[in-house]
Amino acid sequence: MSDSDSQEVNPASLLTRNREWVSQRNQQQHPKILWIGCSDSRVAESIVTMSPPGVIFTQRNIANQFMVGDMNANAVLEYAVARNSENAKPKGLGIDHVVIVGHSGCGGVQAAMDEAEKTRDIDCFKGHAETSNLARWIGPLVELVKQHPEAEGDLDQMVDINVEEQMKNVRAALEKIGGFAKDVQVHGWVYDLESGLLRDLDQPEPEPRTVWE
Ligand SMILES: [Zn+2]
């Protein structure tokens, strides 16, 4: 425990801590991780990992999806993994690890399961053009749910399956980017709202890759 932690908390000590923080804070960003997580307000990446500013590059959306055609997510990924080259302007952050983070009780995954139940006898999620952006956003998830009848009614299992699916999508995007990006490691985690713990799905890499330290 540092001296500042053991100090009595009062207005003066908080002002002192603020000045200590200012002297130590990192105004540059040198993140080593790209976190692709859910928009859920309870799964704030820097808070649940106790990470200071500048450490985690982030993309969050409903149900932590990485869609092949999502320009926003693809731009984030490209910038995250691009390497700087000598005598050239910085091109990217040179990140080596991408983490897809799902979470228990995900409302986005639950909504997709509910929609899949209603439309189970329909081959394809209909009405994208007529419905809301939210409905269109979860459309691919509805199809994913339908592809996994073994997970019917099991939100926890479907959350895991969704993370695995997004890992595949990220790996495909990295292959497309090529070069250094092909060696970036993709991880799958699930955050448990009740315990506050992150679980590593420990997915094996699909093929031998560069060994990282
Ligand atoms: Zn969620």
Image (cartoon, helix red, strand yellow):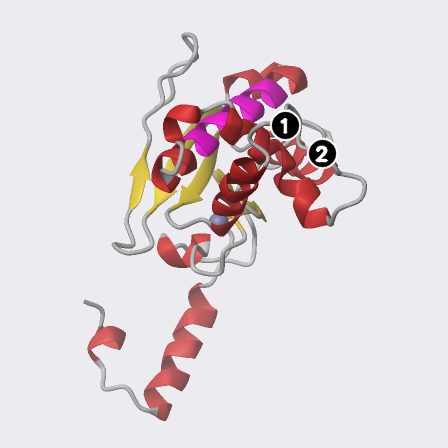
Q: Amino acid at mark 2?
A: Lys
Q: Is residue 211 left or right of residue 168?
A: left
One can see residue 66 in this view: no
Q: Is residue 127 left or right of residue 208?
A: right
Residue placed farthest to the right in the image?
129
Q: Nearer the viewer, residue 43 or 114?
A: 114
Question: Quadrant where the N terminus lies?
Answer: bottom left
Distance CA(mark 2)–CA(mark 1) = 8 Å
Q: Is residue 43 left or right of residue 65?
A: left
- Where residue 113 is drawn, which disc sits there? none
Q: Which residues make up the magenta segment?
A: 161-174
Is 169 contained in the magenta span? yes
Question: What's the magenta bit mostly, secondary-structure-wise?
Answer: helix
Q: Provide residue 80's location: percent of width, then percent of height.
A: 60, 35
Q: Count residues near mark 1 (Cα–Cα under 10 Å), then give few for <14, some for 14-19, many for 20+.
A: few
Which residue is label 2 attached to? 126
In the image, is residue 67 above or below residue 27? Answer: above
Q: Count residues near mark 2 (Cα–Cα under 10 Å), then give few for <14, some for 14-19, many for 20+.
A: few
